[in-house]
Amino acid sequence: MLEMLSMYLSYPFVRYAIIVGVLIALCSSLLGVTLVLKRFSFIGDGLSHVAFGGVAIAAVLNLTNQMLIVLPITVVCAILLLRAGQNTKIKGDAAIAMISVAALAFGYLIMNIFSASSNISGDVCSTLFGSTSILTLTKREVLLCMILSIVVVVLFILLYNKIFAVTFDENFAKVAGIKAERYNLLIAIIIAVIIVLAMNLVGALLITALVVFPALSAMRLFNSFRSVTIFSAVLSIVCALAGILISILAGTPVGSTIVAVDVLAFLICLFAGKAKA
Amino acid sequence: MAGRKQSEHMALMTVRNLSVGYDSNPIKENINFSIGQGDYLCIVGENGSGKSTLMKTLLRLQKPLSGEIMVGDGLQENEIGYLPQQTDVQRDFPASVREIVLSGCQGRSKNRPFYSRADKQMAAKNMERMEIADLAGRCYRELSGGQQQRVLLARALCATEKMLFLDEPVAGLDPKVTASLYELIARLNQEGITIVMVSHDIDAALEYATHILHVGKHIFFGTTEEYLDSENRKLFLTQEGGMQDA
């Protein structure tokens, strides 16, 4: 088995997949803690459907670099959704549901009507479940993913204390002179970037799992914000790594294998937490 | 305790012809009062009379519909400590007491990403002051209601040495814990911190506050003695007396 593994690892595309997978798992888990606590768990789901719509448009326009269109669309929707949480007639969860299914429907519609591809259902399936795209990454995509991930991690570390303050008590933070809206906006933009990156790894439908499972697992076991954040990052990386390796060895789809490992880890943490209490 | 006279120009905060409300629907109009250094102001009134909205407006969490809120006497806008009502998010929030108290130092360390040693000392001092130093490593969600309020008070004290705004600080606490929290707040006031409190609890307001702002059908503002003589008190007691005793 080790031989087989080292054989696979000698292929650059496998190494790329592992690098990208680990980075995305790290970024999504960092933001996951905040999103879960702010009751925005489903924002990942909604935004990934938007990103799916973006991919559909990019495919129809025959763009070689889909990122150029998918990223801006997703960022704009992220900002709209996080704002909707505050003071509009349509409440946060309803707004997410609306945007997410609408984007999904229009995305599929556009792909069906305009697509030049001969294998529409294959395209749709791989966009939704990320089946093979992670194994076909080019060097440029890997580089882009690395740069964006580093930016996300550095921003998160620099703003960690502010993010904590804004997540725990937005009104107090505002009174203390922190520009809470600005940080909410930043969180929205970062989550949009992560989702667009994660589309390659697990596909549009499973991104929420990467965001919420590590955070929820860590919350079963730990009692301070810092330990929850660190543990969820570590757990997420371990699960992504394990998931990718299992999928390579067993020939299973990458995205769903990673998510399955995340679910398993959550169950273990759940019982460990119960045993501790 | 009552009756400390403050001249107008010494006021930390002066409110003139203020109207508060949402979406240009005023809940309360034409509010006038001032808060001097060292005052203990209680904002009392029935449910829905607009006292929490007034406090949010004073804290600039929402815009006044009209009128002015002037801050003076060397008070910076970010030198106000705030004890908000608990939110849903906080109830199951995984955070240690130390982390929460430290987050009160955010206002002073605006452009620094991390806490300085001075911030950490400040947090330790205020945990000591609130008698929660032994809870520093504990998880917030596992504490009792009274302990949680002390944590949030310590956090507010990290943000200010001058002025504290408290929004129904004893809501949901048992009588014994309530009494000790009131004593704690009174002690802070004696140390020179100006207190502004929104409260249902008229008896405690009369016992501790130097000034009363009654937001109701009529608006009353004055010292506690003046309030005791005023018509408003009788009105308030006849309207709400039964509820308060219950």
Image (cartoon, coloured by chain):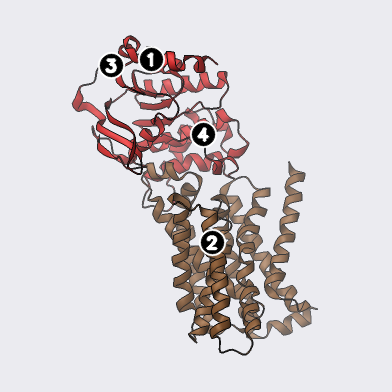
Under mark 4, the amino acid is Val
Is residue A155 visible in the rendered structure shown here? no
Question: In terms of secondary structure, where does tag 3 sit?
Answer: loop
- What amino acid type is highlighted by mark number 3? Arg
Report if residue A71 is visible in the image. Answer: yes
Among the two numbered marks 1 and 3 on one chain, the one whose residue lies closer to the N terminus: 3
Q: Is residue B122 above or below residue B4?
A: below
Image location (x, y in percent) of residue B96: 57, 42
Q: CA distance from mark 1 to mark 4?
A: 36 Å
Chain letter, colour red in render: B
- Residue on which disc 3 sits: B4
Q: Nearer the viewer, residue B243 or B86?
A: B243
Q: Residue at x 27, y 33 (%)?
A: B18
Using the image, determine if residue A267 lies above or below residue B132.
Answer: below
In the image, taking residue B80 as reference, residue A197 lies left or right, namely: right
- Which residue is found at the position 50% from the left and 26% from the top? B170
Q: Secondary structure at mark 1?
A: helix
Task: Name the residue beneath numbered marker 4.
Answer: B151
Label 2: few (<14), some (14–19) or many (≥20) C-alpha neighbours in 10 Å: few
Q: Which residue is mark 2?
A: A98
The tint of chain A in the picture is brown
- The answer to which of A89 and A136 lies nearer the viewer is A89
Q: Nearer the viewer, mark 1 or mark 4?
A: 1
Please tell me if label 1 and label 2 are on a single chain. no
- Subunit that carries the residue with mark 1: B
